[in-house]
Image: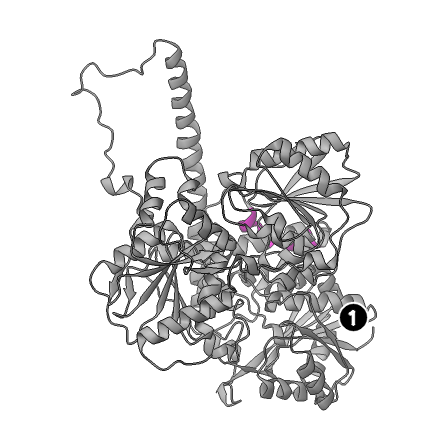
Amino acid sequence: MTDHILIILPVFQPNEIHFRAQLASIARQTHQAHSVLFVVADTVSNTLIDEAAKEAGLAYDIATPADRLDAVRAFEFGLATGAAQMPGTNLFALCDQDDIWHPDKLATSLSEMRAKNADLVHSDARVVDENGDLLHQSLFRMERRDKLPGLRGLLYRNNVTGMTVLMTRRVVEAALPFPPQDGVHFYHDLWLALVATVLSKVAFVDAQLVDYRQHAANAVGAITHAAENQKFGRVWLRRRAASYALAMYLARSLVLRLGHGAEEQTALKKLKPFLSPITIGPRFVADSALLALRGHASLARTALHFALIATGRSVWALKNAMSGGVEGALKEFDARVYALSPGPLPQAASPEIATPEPAANWAEKIDQRTKPKFTPVMTADAPVMNILVPTLNPAEIFAGIVTALDFGTGLAERGVPVRFIATDLPIAAPSASLEFILQRVQGSADRMRTSGRISIQCGCNDRRLVCHPQDRFFATAWWTAHQANHILQSGRFSQTRFHYLIQDFEPNFYPWGAEYAGAMESYAFDFHPIFNTSLLRDYFAEHGFTFAGPSTQVFRPSIDISRYADLPSKRRPDHKLIALYGRPEVARNMFPVAVDALSRFLRDSGLKRDDVSVVSVGLKHGDIELPGNIRLRSLGKLPWSDYPSFLSTVDLGLSLMYSPHPSHLPIEMAAAGANVVTNSFGPKDLSQLSPAIISGAPTAPALTAALKQAWAAPAPDASSRQIDLSPMGWTLDATVEQLASHLHEGWNYKRRCA
């Protein structure tokens, strides 16, 4: 086996001084049989990489992905690229862009790998500040890590730091591709350590071989235990449940990936507590006791928390099976047969004899979304822009919320402090939510300072919102408009007007009733409207809303066309792929009509499953058998970073939206090179944007005809993919710039440029 080591080093908006220092430390390695594969994770740092690598005298290659990548996906991309391009290389090391390797880092790791016959080696590290001054001699001692956690222990707390890792090709090939995730809930080093532990052995070098640079821009930093003591409650329980869910997800991913060989099956038995359908967590309790005896109090608490969540999960399942499943089913059956004869349900002879049903509290019968669960506390030193969004959990974020996030990050880049507040769903993993938002920071000259202006808060569970009298509020859905109005009408703020991001005519989401009326009521509040496209503004104007005038702020869809139009095609000439935007629970996406039209098209065209595959993206639903023995396979919601690559494989798209809002997907599909069918609605006709988009009437026959036309059409050429969105409004940047200027002027302080 050759001793050549391929070093995978992703680069994302690096500090140039730190980056050059890291490369110099690689060049000083006593083990010189190495080369570096740089991953340009920000897609723009090629020139700096080339200059710095040549200056350091390194042997290197550069790999640039089609889109910006977070840390996990950058390492995944680098390992996949390196393994494919260098088939003779059997050793891989991971490297961050701003740490310092000690000269014997590679040599010592390789020696330990040989001595222990291990497939993965990692080490301790020193912790230094951004200037290189020592903060702590040992990362392991500072974080009280367990040096020998075992397979289950890794799921309590990962003890492997990626930038210390040396591993074999065997681990790399088994670990790729990484399990999908929305945002960043786990890092690459944990998954690699789990895979290596199942395959053979992980070795630990009890010495500091790297200086780990701790600063504000770290993807993930060294942690202390000061924040562990948190009161028991909904927030506590939700966060522990999220940790348990992640551990269970990784355990099951390991079984699916590696559970085929006899040796691997033996190793995977350690994960049984995560795999049992019903358990009260005795193994977790035993682990907790052992960890406590070994002096790992924090890990002992984690194991005990897992026991609590596992027990709660089992109790919840059994309770629902017994009550909702059996008792509820029996009551429903009895009610149906009583309806046949004699009609009414059995009743007590007198109301006094009847056992009274429990009475519900009145608050349970009103729409809780319209009232904020927090109380403003006027103790802040400076004002912020508060952006109210239904959720900040990456897995629950769709395009509409992404647009609101882009408003917030754009304001932060222009010097405005921004706080995102989740109003509907508690934040499950704050670090993953914040990382998802920060990944959308674009073009900032000082990303660290911009990130420092962005904060998040759980409006579901936090009962206090620290505010300033000049705080501003930004609503993003009709019920958040009610919350903003309620807060500002309290008389504690200098402004009673809020900003309202209007992205659809929301009353039409509902039948006539309370929600319809609530959405309509929101349009009578005192607000500054910001419309997503001129098409939507025009629809409001046509229906008599006077705030939708010609001077109203209007922006075009927040779509980076180049993100899709510049992608190379991954389509198969011998087998076509049809993609449906499938969200059965969302009425305006017309799922039944889409399935009807798709079925008619497949039947009339005589297509079979050897000719075409059909998938649904959006919300997970059951698979559907279509004509021609073709199965409509539901993929659910795709991770945001995987979305462009997926669209580059699609030949024909079907995306319906029965509303005046021009949904993003037809435009993105067309820009990615697919022929697309969508529907018209009022002033909306997306076919005017590109010949790759066919807009039909929202009926199954009309959409069937449109599908046939799109199927027969040639693939869109380059000009058809360069879609001009300017007829629909200003750029989002221009809109944000105007809003930022307005805020700075209103707050009467000097603008701080990002």
Residue range in magenta is: 264-275
Residue 247 on the magenta segment:
no
Residue 272 on the magenta segment:
yes
- Residue 37, image x and y in percent? 73, 75
Occupied quadrant, residue 389 = bottom left
- Tell me the kind of residue under disc 1: Asn
Q: How is the image coloured?
A: one colour
Left or right of 358 on screen, residue 415: right
Mark 1 element type: loop
| Residue topped by disc 1 | 90
Occupied quadrant, residue 264 = bottom right
Q: Which residue lies furthest to the top in this view?
A: 342
- Residue 744, image x and y in percent? 36, 75
Q: Is the magenta stretch mostly helix, strand or loop?
A: helix
Q: Is residue 626 visible?
A: no
Task: Please tell me whether residue 508 is drawn above or below residue 19 in the rendered image.
Answer: above
Left or right of 132 on screen, residue 472: left
Which quadrant, please, contains the N terminus? bottom right
Q: Which of 65 and 478 is in front in this view?
A: 478
Task: Please tell me whether residue 445 is drawn above or below residue 266 in the rendered image.
Answer: below
Badge 1, how many Cα within 10 Å: few under 14, some, many 20+? Answer: some
Residue at screen point 68% across, 50% down:
691
- Residue 324, image x and y in percent? 41, 32
Occupied quadrant, residue 213 = bottom right
- Residue 379, image x and y in percent? 24, 72
Q: Which residue lies furthest to the front in this view?
A: 550
Left or right of 371 on screen, residue 27: right
